[in-house]
Image (tube, rainbow, N blue to C red):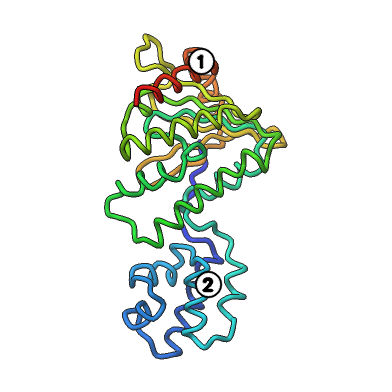
């Protein structure tokens, strides 16, 4: 069976949140009174205090000044382990990414996060229902851009992507965002440790009709897979299940356009905008 990683807050997040709440109450502020003082929403303050989200540097600085300016919150924030802007169920996979020997991704819904330019990330966030508060949106953008440093921070890691052509045909964000996306993908395809393939819309064979696939291999030769839904994710460690997904991914790569033909398609799509 696979290994499920529940979307629970980390201990350090909960501890920091409880510390913020204790200081706030010690100074006699309700959340409704405290929120405008730090210029964050009541919802955001509650999420931080309950350990559901990471406090960014701006919140920490403002809260510390409002709550006595002792530096205690600044020091405590250094020990919070969760990465801001990443969903709680995704953080285990993000840890595996940073130490991977290889990463393989197939996507049929949207461009994979590691390949998204900032304009595309913002266009995705603009479609969120309910809408994200501004501070949460900025945290998502920062986290997504930070993940992309993997291409350069881990030059010996191989990154393989297969993306459905239909994903690129969707004009998310308008013409300018689409043009930015295609340029971004073309630039990524030139990296020595990145292989990008497009699965053509008109094809008679398709090995991954069951949905997206993510695979990772660690330095100790362990392999994992990851499955993500609307509001949840599952890290899969069972060898048989991972092997089945790896077999499907390998078959899909043989059915997709070659890297060279994929670049040609991207260039044609860019020229047609």
Rounded to the nearest whole Å, what is the CA distance between mark 2 and mark 1?
A: 47 Å
Residue 48 is tagged as none
Q: Position of residue 195 (x, y in %)?
A: 58, 25
- Which residue sits at x=38%, y=74%? 39
Give x and y (percent) for residue 259.
54, 18
| Residue on which disc 1 sits | 251
Which residue position is annotated with label 2? 16
Q: Is residue 30 left or right of residue 48?
A: left
45 or 145, which lies in front?
145
Placement of 192 over or under 145, stated as above or below:
above
Residue for point 36% across, 44% down: 124
Q: Position of residue 16 (x, y in %)?
A: 53, 72
- Mark 2 or 1 closer to N-term? 2
Q: Is residue 141 visible?
A: yes
Q: Quadrant of residue 228?
A: top left
Residue 223 seen in this snapshot = no
Choose between 245 and 115: the one closer to the eye: 115
- Secondary structure, mark 2, is helix
Label 2 CA crowd tier, 10 Å (few <14, some 14–19, many 20+): many
Is the C-beta separation of discs 2 and 1 under 8 Å?
A: no
Closer-to-camera residue (132/96) = 132
Q: Which of 267 and 104 lies nearest the eye of the viewer?
A: 267
């Amino acid at each position: 069976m696979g290994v499920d990683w529940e979307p629970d807050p980390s201990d350090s997040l909960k501890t920091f949140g409880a510390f913020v709440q204790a200081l706030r109450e010690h100074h006699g502020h309700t959340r409704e009174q405290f929120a405008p003082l730090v210029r964050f929403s009541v919802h955001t303050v509650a999420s931080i205090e309950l350990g559901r989200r990471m406090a960014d540097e701006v919140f920490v600085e403002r809260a510390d000044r409002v709550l006595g300016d002792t530096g205690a919150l600044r020091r405590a924030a250094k020990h919070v382990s969760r990465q801001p802007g990443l969903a709680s169920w995704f953080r285990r996979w993000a840890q595996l990414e940073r130490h991977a020997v290889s990463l393989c991704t197939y996507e049929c819904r949207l461009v994979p996060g590691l390949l998204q330019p900032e304009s595309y990330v913002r266009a995705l966030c603009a479609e969120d229902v309910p809408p994200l508060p501004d501070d949460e949106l900025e945290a998502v953008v920062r986290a997504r851009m930070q993940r992309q440093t993997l291409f350069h921070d881990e030059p010996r890691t191989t990154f393989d992507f297969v993306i459905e052509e239909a994903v690129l045909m969707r004009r998310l964000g308008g013409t300018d965002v689409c043009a930015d996306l295609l340029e971004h993908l073309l630039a990524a395809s030139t990296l020595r440790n990145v292989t990008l393939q497009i699965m053509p819309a008109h094809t008679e064979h398709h090995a991954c009709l069951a949905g997206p696939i993510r695979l990772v291999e660690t330095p100790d030769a362990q392999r994992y897979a990851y499955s993500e839904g609307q509001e949840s994710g599952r890290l899969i460690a069972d060898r048989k299940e991972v092997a089945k997904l790896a077999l499907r991914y390998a078959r899909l790569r043989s059915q997709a356009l070659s890297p060279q033909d994929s670049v040609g398609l991207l260039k044609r799509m860019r020229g047609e905008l």
